[in-house]
Structures are given as structure tokens and as C-alpha cells.
Image (tube, rainbow, N blue to C red):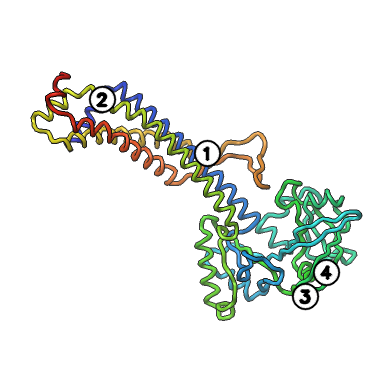
């Protein structure tokens, strides 16, 4: 306690220098907090939109389908499996998807496309597919007046094949039984623009896709949506547990994967980019603490004679070492406290309101109109730990210098 009182008095001895040092440390703390908040908040936005609109939080597929997709590696589409998946804790919505490739024909051209078979109503509730329409209307599960199934096509497909709503689209592919599949569909809507992820899609009603690929009552994925993409691994465990509790599915070769496994490359790239942001934060805090090193060194040099007297009357070196380190940690604690009081309301505003952009930006087919932050304990804990650690690190040299002073040489400075 005595050391703490001495450290506090020494910090206040030169108030002007202390205030300047505090300002630099507080500034570094606030900047790092906000940079981390916007960095993680941007990724949260991206992942929330990506998982909601594309891959879901959890997928149920045939074993090895994610590593080596094949048309024949399917999962059943029946009420028994749907009911068992729905019973898992945390499941909010789910829908089956059939996915494969085909060759699409317009009047004069052909184009390789990605075919998706979906349950129109359930797919729209889960992935908000109708919000991405740029022309026409949304898909119906029923045949049109000419007895043809309807189709949605991506903007690139529409442009390259010169198709518009109301036009006929021909698809040719190989069926699961080895037969040549070909069918005529009526285009009812166009999705997104030519840069969007859905630009090469052809979306069909699930029943139409099953007929086309000769996969009755089959699909390739069950897409499951929970409450939060950050709890996907917990949701996947609940789905596995639900399947294991039913004898019909316990021994079935079904693979339950959270989005981190489904989109492994995307997830690893995102983590690497986040680590890059953390390294930048380390560098910023270290540069700020170089100024702290200068302050502590100047303080030690000014008090060299005082330290000599203390050592002459029997003060052990470790007591001087501890006092210098404690002074630095007092500064760091003050900086973190003041920085938290400044950063908390700003971060709250960033999270709830965000920074509006004059025009939405597009990243990998995802659109964002605001920069938003993340309000969580680690947004403040990480800068606090960084400030404390680097402050402790830069205090070691001045503290060691003070502890090694010889009383006679030090008292000559008086």
C-alpha cells in the first residue's frame, strides 16, 4: 500500500508531463477500441448477411458431399427428417436445396449455369430471395398456363442469353440415372446484377429440379437457420443430438456442418484478415508506449539523486524496481479508465446507428450501406490488456536502471 501511495504521488509530481502522457495513451486506447469495433462489426455484418442469404448457419448433407460434391450424394426430403431437424434446440427455419450444374440455352447462345431447386415460399422466408429481384416477379411452385415450370435467372444469365421475364429457357444436363435431361422453363424473374453471387443461378421449384435430375424426394442440402451465426457450432451439436435420438437417422450417413466448415476457405481468410487488424493495433499501442518509456526515463533521471539516498538508507533494489513499474501501471490504469469512458458511448453509437455511406458498397456480392461496430466486452478488454502489457514492457528498462544505481554515484546528482 505504501508503494502505491508513493507511485501515485510520483505520478502527480510533474502534472503537465503526466497529462500529456495520459492523453497519448487515452488516444491510443480509444483508436484501437474503435478500429477493433468497426473491424469486427464489419465482419459481423458480412457474415450475418452471407449466412442468412446464402449458406445458412448449419447444413445437413450426405457424408463427403462438402469435400467431393456429386449429383448422387443426396439427403432425403421427407416429413420425418424435416420434423427431426425442426426439433433440435435453436432451429428457427430450415429448407432443402438441390444444387447442380446445367447448360442453359437462349435463342442463339448457351451458357453453363448453377441450378438450384428450392421450396419457393420457405426459401424466401429463410434467404429473402425475393428481395434480390431486379425484374419480374418471384417464383411459384405451380406450373404456368402452358404447363411449364417457372424459373428465376441471374442477371448475367439474362444478359448473355438475351432473356427477359416471359421468355423460354432450355436446360440440358445429365440426370442421376445417366439419362440426358432437358426441359423448357418460363423465366418469371431476374436476380440481382451481373456482379452479384446469384448472377449465374437458375432457380427452379424443388419438385421441378427433382424431376429434371431424376432425384425424386431428394436434395443435396438441408439449410438450417438459428438465432445467431456466432452460435452455429452449438446449433450443429444440437442437430446432431436430435438426429442421434431417432433410430431412423442415428445410423444414416448424414454430415452436420456449421457454416465455418461449409465455407472453410472464406472463414480462414476472414480470420487471417482479422489477425492483420490485431497486429496493426499492437503496433499502434507499442508506438504510444514508446512515449511512455520516454516519460518514465525522464522521471528516473530527474530522481537519480533521490534514488541514491533511498538506497543509502537501505531500500532494497527490488523496492525501487517495483515502485517504477507501479508508477507506469498507475498511468496505464488511468489511461484505460478514461479511454473506456470516451470509447464506450462512441462504440455504442457505432453499433446501434453506424456510419452511413453515401452509396452502398459491394463486397463479394454483398451490399452494405453502413459501417457498424461491435459492442462486446472483448472490444474493451483487448485494448486494456495491450496497454497494460506494453506499459509493463517499457517500464522494465527504466525500473532496472533505477534498481542498479549505486548510492555514491547517484547522490552526486543532488
Mark 2 to mark 1: distance in Å? 39 Å
Residue 181 got which mark? 4
Tell me if residue 103 comes above or below residue 310 in the rendering: below
Disc 2 and disc 3 in contact, CB within 8 angstroms: no
Q: In the image, residue 346 lies at what x, y percent?
A: 48, 36
**In which image quadrant can residue 293 be found?**
top left
Tell me if mark 3 has few (under 14), some (14-19) or many (20+) residues whose alpha carbon lies within 10 angstroms of its own.
Answer: few
Judging depth in this view, the residue of 400 and 333 nearest the camera is 400
Mark 2 to mark 3: distance in Å? 83 Å
Label 1 residue SS: helix
Judging depth in this view, the residue of 224 and 11 nearest the camera is 11
Q: Earlier in the sequence, mark 4 or mark 1?
A: 4
Q: Earlier in the sequence, mark 2 or mark 3?
A: 3
Q: In the image, residue 49 lies at what x, y percent?
A: 62, 50
Tell me if mark 2 has few (under 14), some (14-19) or many (20+) residues whose alpha carbon lies within 10 angstroms of its own.
Answer: some
Q: Which residue is mark 2?
A: 299
Mark 4 to mark 1: distance in Å? 52 Å
User: Can residue 344 be spotted in the picture?
Assistant: no
Q: Which residue is mark 3?
A: 177
Tell me if mark 1 has few (under 14), some (14-19) or many (20+) residues whose alpha carbon lies within 10 angstroms of its own.
Answer: many
Disc 1 and disc 3 in contact, CB within 8 angstroms: no
Q: Which residue is mark 1?
A: 350
How many marks on residues? 4
Residue 143 got which mark? none
Q: Nearer the viewer, mark 1 or mark 3?
A: 3
Disc 4 and disc 1 in contact, CB within 8 angstroms: no
User: Can residue 55 be spotted in the picture?
Assistant: yes
Label 2 residue SS: helix
Tell me if residue 267 comes above or below residue 25 in the rendering: below
Residue pushed farthest left? 313
Q: Quadrant of the C terminus?
A: top left
Label 4 residue SS: strand
Amino acid at each position: 500500500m505504501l508503494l502505491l501511495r508513493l507511485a501515485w504521488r510520483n505520478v502527480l509530481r510533474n502534472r503537465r508531463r503526466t497529462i500529456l502522457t495520459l492523453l497519448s495513451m487515452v488516444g491510443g486506447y480509444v483508436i484501437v477500441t474503435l478500429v477493433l469495433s468497426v473491424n469486427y462489426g464489419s465482419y459481423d455484418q458480412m457474415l450475418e448477411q452471407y449466412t442468412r442469404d446464402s449458406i445458412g448457419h448449419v447444413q445437413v448433407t450426405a457424408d463427403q458431399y462438402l469435400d467431393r460434391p456429386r449429383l448422387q450424394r443426396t439427403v432425403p426430403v421427407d416429413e420425418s427428417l424435416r420434423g427431426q431437424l425442426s426439433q433440435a434446440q435453436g432451429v428457427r427455419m430450415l429448407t432443402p436445396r438441390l444444387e447442380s450444374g446445367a447448360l442453359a440455352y437462349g435463342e442463339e447462345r448457351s451458357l453453363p449455369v448453377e441450378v438450384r431447386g428450392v421450396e419457393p415460399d420457405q426459401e424466401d422466408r429463410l434467404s429473402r430471395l425475393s428481395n434480390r429481384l431486379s425484374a419480374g416477379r418471384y417464383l411459384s411452385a405451380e406450373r404456368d398456363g402452358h404447363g411449364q415450370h417457372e424459373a428465376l435467372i441471374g442477371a448475367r444469365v439474362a444478359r448473355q442469353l438475351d432473356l427477359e421475364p416471359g421468355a423460354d429457357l432450355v436446360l440440358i444436363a445429365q440426370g442421376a440415372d445417366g439419362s440426358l435431361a432437358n426441359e423448357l422453363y418460363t423465366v418469371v424473374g431476374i436476380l440481382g446484377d451481373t456482379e452479384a453471387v446469384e448472377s449465374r443461378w437458375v432457380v427452379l421449384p424443388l419438385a421441378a429440379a427433382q424431376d429434371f435430375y431424376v432425384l425424386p424426394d431428394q436434395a443435396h442440402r438441408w439449410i438450417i437457420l438459428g438465432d445467431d451465426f456466432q452460435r452455429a457450432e452449438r446449433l450443429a451439436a444440437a442437430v446432431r443430438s436430435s438426429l442421434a435420438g431417432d433410430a431412423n437417422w442415428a445410423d444414416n450417413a448424414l454430415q452436420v456442418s456449421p457454416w465455418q466448415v461449409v465455407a472453410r476457405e472464406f472463414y480462414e481468410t476472414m480470420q487471417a484478415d482479422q489477425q492483420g487488424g490485431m497486429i496493426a493495433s499492437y503496433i499502434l499501442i507499442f508506438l504510444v508506449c514508446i512515449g511512455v518509456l520516454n516519460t518514465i526515463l525522464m522521471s528516473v533521471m530527474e530522481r537519480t539523486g533521490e534514488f541514491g539516498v533511498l538506497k543509502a538508507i537501505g531500500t532494497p533494489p527490488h523496492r525501487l524496481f517495483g515502485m517504477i513499474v507501479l508508477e507506469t501501471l498507475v498511468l496505464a490504469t488511468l489511461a484505460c479508465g478514461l479511454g473506456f469512458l470516451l470509447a464506450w458511448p462512441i462504440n455504442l453509437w457505432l453499433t446501434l446507428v453506424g456510419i452511413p455511406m453515401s452509396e452502398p458498397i459491394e463486397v463479394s456480392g454483398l451490399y452494405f450501406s453502413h459501417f457498424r461496430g461491435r459492442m462486446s466486452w472483448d472490444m474493451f478488454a483487448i485494448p486494456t490488456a495491450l496497454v497494460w502489457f506494453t506499459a509493463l514492457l517499457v517500464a522494465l528498462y527504466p525500473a532496472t536502471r533505477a534498481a542498479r544505481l549505486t548510492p555514491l554515484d547517484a547522490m552526486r546528482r543532488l
